[in-house]
Image (cartoon, rainbow, N blue to C red):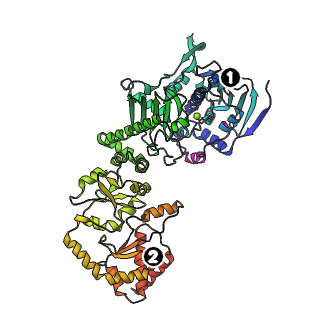
Amino acid sequence: MTTKKETLNFQTEVKQLLHLMIHSLYSNKEIAIRELISNASDASDKLRFEALNNNDLYEGQSGLDIHVDFDKEKRTVTVSDNGIGMDRDEIVANIGTIARSGTKEFIGKLSGDQAKDAHLIGQFGVGFYSAFIIADEVTLETKKAGEKQGYRWQSKGDGEFSIEDIKKEGRGTSVTLHLKKDEDEFLDNWRLREIIKKYSDHITLPIVMKKTDFKGGESIKTDEDETINNASAIWAKNKKDVKAKEYQEFYKSLTYDNEEPLAYFHNRVEGTQEYTSLLYIPSKAPFDLYDRERGLGVKLYVKRIFIMEATEKLMPQYLRFIKGVIDSNDLPLNVSREILQDSRQVESIKSGTVKKVLTSLEDMAKKKPEDYKVFWKEFGRVLKEGPAEDMVNKDKIAKLLRFSSTYDESDEQSVSLQDYIERMKPEQEHIYFITADSYSAAKNSPHLEIFKKKKIEVLILGDRVDEWMVSYLTEFEGKKLQSIAKGDLDLGKLEEDSEKEEKKKIEEKAKTLVDTMKKSLGDKVKEVKVTHRLTDSPSCLVVGENDISGNLERILKAAGQDTPDVKPVLEINPTHSLIKKLESFSGTADFDRYAAVIFDQAVLAEGGQLNDPVQYVKNINDLLVKV
Ligand code: ADP
Ligand code: MG
């Protein structure tokens, strides 16, 4: 019956992966079994989903389960399912190549630390190949639901695999591991049971093994089937009946995370919409948190049947760190991506769930500040994407944000906007902030001088996402968020009348200097002005109230985007001795040199790059020689 047998080469990445897997994960042997069971479960979910629209696929056999068996004589362990199966092309595509683009990155991330690497393997779904950790040969036999032809795939994990046609009875897949010589531990009922309980207890299909009897001190396999796992959906249970330990175990089986989750929220919503959500916040950010193409972490179930990995229709990007399940009682079972697209029900599940997450976070901040600190450190930068993505919940999100500030001068972001408002001076109207491309650049910005002198608190924003965030979050509780590097500095009532008069006088006195400087700098600047921000520095750059900031301009340029051509305003401090010196050069050739240096230094102080660094060095040197 067997026809053509063909031998094919693994894709290079697969070879690399196999090599690494075998050599770096030999002490994580259990994951081989775990991954095969997980694939069997996925295959059954897929069949169930497809069969919603085509019941014939069941061919009269709709009871789905997973069988785990072993054979002491042949030294094999077999995991079989009656799920969707694969056709020939699918075999080649799914277990001959690695389709996911992140694989190279994945391989680079493997650290040699076994616990960490095992964790990564789960996240990346390169699970099938882990079979080769304990097997020196793997045979996979499969038949796709609704088709006649079966196939056998076979490999020794050494660079090539073979495929041949076979006759196979039922649909689905069975994977047989031919164990390596030291792996006899898996030829044991209790050992396999233990692994199933540990990793797969929450799989919602029965995992079945043959029962073992003890006779005369020997264990003998019987013909009787026995279900090993719990096979119940814990989110469908009453909160009271689920122990903390069970929540944690479920989290681990869902995410393959080795660590306990930081928090979880289990919530049943009744009324017009009925759904349950069980959501987790991990205690550590995954390394690919910033890869927006990675899947979101929430799975959609309908009446306890897995439907799909969540899309943005269920969870917004700025909450992409949330893991868990949402199970609806109302959605049609044959919900498709198209239905998800514009379903009112889905919309309302999403908005309800997002609100729940935000409220739970607020709760955590109040009641478990230490946990919130951990949360913020790991996921704060993602949450900062919120105000731009979710207008509706902007205020709720704003309350959750934490920043560095001049109040405690620490790079740990711990100041909330509410804290800030409580500390505001009675005459203060705005929430002041400064952005730069790092905490230290922002903290040392000359723009802060007057604020420090007057003891006005300023938020220090040094994360990349901050620029983006403040362009959406322009107000909090009626207070405007004001950049201190934009527009004319108007401290309003924070300034005494006498100070204002003093300012005018200084401006008048410096008028000629300002004009001469503008002439000298030409179109490098929009304007030269007397500053009221600086106390210690000679100069700084400012942009118009509605122009993009220098920091944002640099971010956009680095990302290869076009930026509007904005000329900065140069503000000078006439009381600074350098500016006084400059004044004394009026009418000489050194004036231009001096003026150029002062401008360039303002650019550098912002963390900017000089257009012509060579000219800067030359100017400085010429001036140094004359000292
Ligand atoms: P992942 O499960 O994350 O996709 P794996 O390496 O575990 O990665 O599996 C690769 C692919 O092989 C699966 O996505 C699936 O398409 C296919 N596959 C593996 N095992 C089975 C199975 N038992 N039944 C059907 N398809 C399977
Ligand atoms: Mg898998």
**Left or right side of 86 for 509:** left
Question: Does residue 217 appear anywhere in the picture?
Answer: no
Q: Is residue 12 above or below residue 611?
A: above
Q: Which residue is drawn at 54% across and 46% down?
A: 293
* Magenta run includes residue 304: no
Specify start and end residues of the magenta stretch as a single range.
Answer: 95-114
Q: What element does badge 1 sit on?
A: loop
Q: What residue type is labelled 1?
A: Lys
Q: What element does badge 2 sit on?
A: helix
Q: Name the spot of residue 438 as percent of width and height, x first.
A: 41, 60
The residue carrying pointer 1 sits among few (fewer than 14), some (14 to 19) or many (20 or more) residues within 10 Å by Cα, namely few
The residue indicated by pointer 2 is: 524
Which one is nearer the viewer's eye here, 580 or 10?
580
The residue indicated by pointer 1 is: 74
The quadrant the C terminus occupies is bottom left
Q: Name the spot of residue 597 as percent of width and height, x first.
A: 42, 78
How many numbered marks appear? 2
Q: Which residue is drawn at 42% across and 56% down?
A: 463
Ligand 2 location (quadrant): top right
Query: Marks 1 and 2: which is nearer the front?
Result: 2
Q: Which amino acid does label 2 sit on?
A: Lys
Q: Which mark is first along the chain, 2 or 1?
A: 1
**Left or right side of 426 for 272:** right
| Image quadrant assignment for residue 492 | bottom left
* Magenta run includes residue 96: yes
Question: Does residue 441 appear anywhere in the picture?
Answer: yes
Q: In this view, does 190 lie above or below 101?
A: above
Q: In this view, does 561 lie above or below 260?
A: below
| Image quadrant assignment for residue 210 | top right
Q: Name the spot of residue 497 as percent of width and height, x first.
A: 20, 71
